Amino acid sequence: MKQKLMTQKVTGKPLNIDMVPTVHHWPNLKTVLMVEKILSEADLTMSLEQLKRKLPKKVMDQTLRLILLYLEENGKIYIGEKGITWIYNPSPKLERAMREGIEV
């Protein structure tokens, strides 16, 4: 698996998602879906700390960072300067427009 180091510029602290080889606890599907739901229902960009506070159950920091890496690699979230944003849009109209559109 590709190693990666993400930086959250709001706090200036790195997300340290390059710890994949030493993962002690892998996330289960229920945890991934719980994080997905919180992020997809969020109206605004949220920081890692805000996400942790909104989760209904506590999640280990390393596990949460691994979930965020997974979601970013699959194009569901964007981790930017202001935090984490849900970007996934399963709209068939959007997909068709992208497929049939002309690249400039």
Image (cartoon, rainbow, N blue to C red):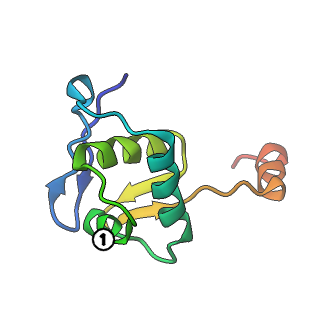
Disc 1 secondary structure class: helix
Query: Is 41 left, or right, of 24 in this rendering?
Result: right
Name the residue located 72 percent from the left edge and 46 percent from the top edge: 103
Few, some or many residues within 10 Å of mark 1 (<14, 14–19, 20+): few
Q: Residue furthest front?
A: 57
Total labels: the figure holds 1
Instruction: Give the x, y percent position of residue 51.
Output: 35, 66
Query: Is 50 left, or right, of 102 in this rendering?
Result: left
Name the residue located 55 percent from the left edge and 64 percent from the top edge: 40
Q: Which image quadrant is residue 53 in?
A: bottom left
For this rendering, which residue is in front, 100 or 48?
48
Q: Which image quadrant is residue 55 in?
A: bottom left
- Residue to which mark 1 is pinned: 53
- Name the quarter where the N terminus is drawn: top left
Vertical order, 1 against 85 (above or below): above
Instruction: Give the x, y percent position of residue 5.
Output: 24, 40
Name the residue located 23 percent from the left edge and 52 percent from the top edge: 7
Vertical order, 18 against 94 (above or below): above
Q: Residue furthest bottom?
A: 43
Instruction: Give the x, y percent position of residue 93.
Output: 84, 57
Which residue type does callout 1 highlight?
A: Arg
Name the residue located 80 percent from the left edge and 43 percent from the top edge: 99
Vertical order, 74 against 40 (above or below): above
